[in-house]
Image (spheres, rainbow, N blue to C red):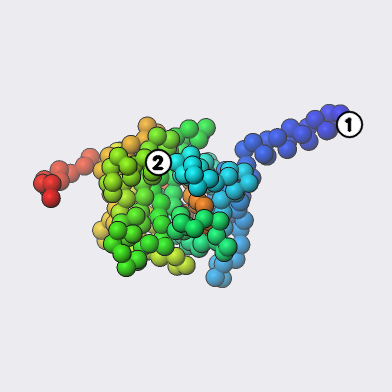
Amino acid sequence: MKKYILYSLLCLFTIESFGQNLQFDKQTFQLFNVTGEIIKFQGEKVLKLERDLKAFPFDINRLEATVDDVHYARLLNLDDFENGTIEVKMYSQIQNPSPFAGAAGFIGLYYRIQEDNSAWESIYLRPKVGRADNQLYRNHTVQYFAYPNAKFDTLRKIAPFKYEGPAPVALNEWIKMRIEINGESAEMFINDLKYSSFIVDKMLGKSKKGSIGLYVDIATTGYFKDLKVTKRALKAKKASEKVNDI
């Protein structure tokens, strides 16, 4: 009996330490500080994610410390992604009531995630401002960051708008995001547009390879489907046309 109790406690500890696993079609996701379930949404089976504020509280007075962090669903059985393409369809809603007045439907991707969650890169969206009638707001639609030392607030202070940009997206509609990663650069494409909406010419993270994750942040209900990951060898970059500072 004592052995059974000890075994049960060890199982419980393992579940709480490493998070719930969800099977979605042929893919398995491990949840880190998010709640998740497989549901029918608009007639299709999707993965629904929300940030778990009990497991990882949000503090508006400590934004840098409590956002863009370990709250995501990790794709298992793929821990060596370095270069290639990540593609996913996402749908973002703001929770009602919203726990954060500045909610913008934060949703996107983590990549090159280290096993211990000590480092990764990310590109995510703020769909609420994607079609705002104010250009300044639109310029905050796309966000790149590198964990742990280059979160959005730090980058906004040291290099305004270099790691943010516009994209033609909105809340309450499906968005197809594709990220092409090659060495130190990353390009993001939206909804099969021919040309990228956003580029990071030199990423800031130290992770060279790792896992892939689906990200949501404060006050966001995110729906995901059709995640596809294609690994490729590093491609030599063509010399680009020189552009002077303007």
Q: Pointer 1: residues within 10 angstroms few (<14), some, or many (20+)? A: few
Give amino acid for label 2: Lys
Q: Point out the residue furthest to the bottom here.
A: 43
In the image, 241: left or right of 50?
Answer: left
- Residue located 56% across and 56% down the image: 99
- Residue located 43% across and 35% down the image: 148
Kind of element beneath mark 1:
loop
Q: Which residue is mark 1?
A: 1
Please state which of residues 39 and 76 is positioned toward the viewer in this rendering: 39
Residue 63: give its label.
none
Give amino acid for label 1: Met
Q: Which residue is mark 2?
A: 151
Q: Pointer 2: residues within 10 angstroms few (<14), some, or many (20+)? A: many
Q: Position of residue 236 (x, y in %)?
A: 23, 40
Q: Position of residue 29 (x, y in %)?
A: 56, 47
- In space, the residues marked 2 and 1 are separated at their CA atoms by 49 Å
- Residue located 52% across and 52% down the image: 218
Kind of element beneath mark 2:
loop
In the image, 36: left or right of 230?
Answer: right
Please state which of residues 63 and 67 is positioned toward the viewer in this rendering: 63
